[in-house]
Image (tube, rainbow, N blue to C red):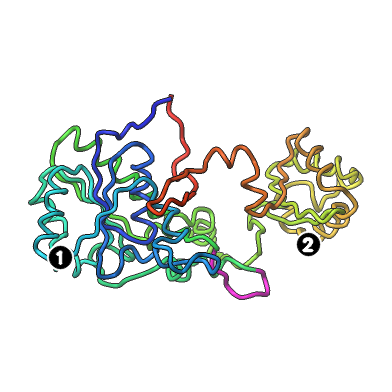
Amino acid sequence: MINNPFSDLVVIELASVLAGPAVGMFFSELGAKVIKVENPKTKGDMTRSWKHPQEDPKAKTSAYYHAINWNKESRFLDLSQKTDYESLKSLIKTADILISNYLPQSADKLKVNFQAIKDINPSIIYASVSAYGIQSQKPGFDALMQAETGWMHMNGSPNGPPIKMPVALIDILAGHQLKQGILTALILRFREPRAYQVSVSLYDAALSALANQASNYLNLDVIPQRKGSQHPNIAPYGDLYLTKDNYYLISAIGTDKQFKDLLNILQLSTYLNDLRFMDNTSRVKNRTALNDILKASFKKINGHELLLKAEEKSIPIGRINNLKEVFESQQAQALILKQLEKDGSISRRVKTNIFKIN
């Protein structure tokens, strides 16, 4: 396996919160030297203070901050001060990539816009993440994006209010888009050495990830409604079932064969030729009747026993785990990154890149 493929890269991170720092951590995990520049006036990245109620209020960093700031060299520089700005310029001269999430007006004022950085380093890759685009002065956060781009309208129970996802997924998606842009720019710079500007907005990242939900609307004029965890196009997919021993299981049945195999292990073979459930289209139309039957059957069976039978037949059914149960697995443990902090504590987070290249 190839380790530290970016060990010769220097990355300057002027970004804060999640999307930009997640990109910086991507490069730090792969061996790059990542220098995180933080503003001393605000006591650094605002996520340093986003502490869980169980955290020490006197601690300098939060668990949230640890999540996406592994193995970075932090520098506190007030860019409005000449000496600190000169220090930044020195760093930029030796850098390959700069990551920023400044609003245009702030970037211009602090002289960290693309033109100013390109003048300092003519071969820099300048990567910026914004809320609505590099020309917009409007700030934005993940929760707003989930609301404004349709995600919250689709998320929640049928009779309940719109619900925000429990992870800032739009930030994560924007970070992935920015990584792709930077990696593409690295290839372009190899072909034609010069400065490149890469930009991604949270808004565009949110829209680009709507996938089949967007297609259902664009092709059918169907506005997706809240269905809990159910899939609008597949059944029983995303449907939840409670077992005899109070396991919550979720189904991800995607083919007719998988469905028939499920009926067999549930001892529901009498429904194999039921026209209401013969194919996926029929099952989606008759989902309520189908779930009445399946829920009654699941409730009679031990969850662990059912999962073993499903695995033998390659039927996609899984248990809903909490994070304690998740991180008890060896596979999850292998993805934990640890770091010794200046105060002697050990911080932990999950790797942000998990691909392997051999």
- Picture layout, residue 114 above or below residue 40: above
Secondary structure of residue under mark 2: helix
Spatial separation of the CA atoms under disc 1 and disc 2: 59 Å
Q: Is residue 342 toward the left or the right of residue 244 in the image?
A: left
Within 10 Å of disc 2 (Cα), the crowding (few <14, some 14-19, many 20+) is few
Query: Which quarter of the image is occupied by the C terminus?
Result: top left
Residue drawn where x is 58% and y is 42% of the image: 332
Can you give x and y, in whole percent of width and height, for residue 288 in the image? 78, 62
- Picture layout, residue 117 above or below residue 227: above
Secondary structure of residue under mark 1: helix
**Lower position in the chain sequence, tag 1 or tag 2:** 1
Instruction: Check if residue 260 falls in the magenta segment.
Output: no
Q: Quadrant of residue 128?
A: bottom left
Q: Nearer the viewer, residue 238 or 67?
A: 67
Residue drawn where x is 44% and y is 61% of the image: 62
User: What residue did someone put label 2 on?
Assistant: 288
- The stretch of residues the image draws in magenta is 157-165
- Main structural element of the magenta stretch: helix, strand or loop? loop
Mark sitting on residue 110: 1
Give, as a three-letter code, the residue at label 1.
Leu
Within 10 Å of disc 1 (Cα), the crowding (few <14, some 14-19, many 20+) is some
Q: Is residue 108 toward the left or the right of residue 354 in the image?
A: left
Q: Nearer the viewer, residue 332 or 49?
A: 49
Q: Quadrant of residue 248?
A: bottom right
Can you give x and y, in whole percent of width and height, for residue 255 in the image? 70, 41
Instruction: Check if residue 161 falls in the magenta segment.
Output: yes
Q: Nearer the viewer, residue 166 or 222?
A: 166
Q: Are the two marked residues, 1 and 2, in contact with CB atoms closer than 8 angstroms?
A: no
